[in-house]
Amino acid sequence: MRTMTPESAIHAYQMIPLDVAGYILGSALLVGHLIALMGGTTARNFVQSSPRNHLLAQITLGLAFAWFFLLVAPADKGLISSLRVDLAEFEGVRWLLQLGCPLFFILLVTQVKELLFPRALGFLGLMLVAPFVTAAFLKLPQTRLLIPIWGYVVVILCLIWVGKPYVYRRMVDWATATPARWTQLCLGGMVYGVAILICAICWW
């Protein structure tokens, strides 16, 4: 029989209340899309240039690898070990994953010059979805499905961007093609954020 370890008992993600996850996600969607809407041409130009923005790619990739390192961090290291996950039968390769974080970061930043940002954004997005989907897992009421629906869409997009970063460039070109389309997408994101916030306040 397998011994219960601290990381196999309750992970930090599982301690996030549904309403707190709703407040954070709803506010992020609302504020983020509001800034994009108010930014107008400046925001559109920034998004249009993002696929080949190498500095932005380095920052995003650094955040993603730092987050991943916290998931595979060594035990008993205080705050650094707070997000550590149980790797079960893969526990023996934990040290390789720890070593790979800085190594792969350096290799990607120095060797991948074309469309690195979509790959980095996809990697970070996969890290970002987990705590929200975990907070909504098997919870009531059914309106909590607003979070996993958002999460699964993000996961699918992130997997595509990591494997086929040119798809991100095409999506950006489509989204920023006209001011009207940009406005509609921003309003749609704001509406979804407001819906999550209302559910978090009233029912979660």
Image (cartoon, helix red, strand yellow):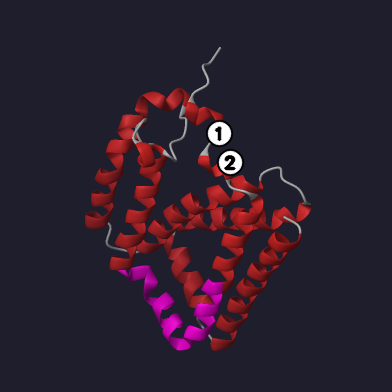
The residue labelled by disc 2 is 14
Instruction: Please determine whether, in this image, residue 129 is positioned above or below residue 41.
Output: above
Q: Residues within 10 Å of mark 1 (few under 14, many from 20)?
A: few
In percent of width and height, residue 123 lies at 43, 53
Q: Amino acid at mark 1?
A: Ile
- The numbered disc on residue 74 is none
Is residue 134 rendered magenta in the image?
Answer: no
Quick one: SS at disc 1?
A: loop
Q: Residue at x 54, y 82 (%)?
A: 37
Identify which residue, 157 or 132, lies in the foreground: 132
Residue appearing at x 60%, y 49% in the figure: 133
Under mark 2, the amino acid is Gln
Residue bounds of the magenta highlight: 31-53
Does the CB distance between marks 2 and 1 fall below 8 Å? Answer: yes
Residue displayed at 67% across by 73% down: 191
Quarter-wise, where is residue 117 in the image?
bottom left
Q: CA distance from mark 2 to mark 1?
A: 6 Å
Q: Relative to 61, is 34 above or below?
A: below
Q: Quadrant of the N terminus?
A: top right
Foreground: 24 or 52?
24
Q: Which quadrant of the view contains residue 122?
A: bottom left
Chief secondary structure of the magenta portion:
helix
Q: Position of residue 58 (x, y in %)?
A: 30, 60
User: Is residue 57 shown left or right of residue 30?
Assistant: left
> Nearest the camera: 56 or 30?
30
Residue at image x 77%, y 51%? 141
Circle 1 sits on which residue? 10
Query: Which quarter of the picture shows residue 26?
Result: bottom right
Q: Position of residue 66 (x, y in %)?
A: 35, 49
Placement of 92 over or under 179, stated as above or below: above
Q: Is residue 15 left or right of residue 50?
A: right
Q: Secondary structure at mark 2?
A: helix
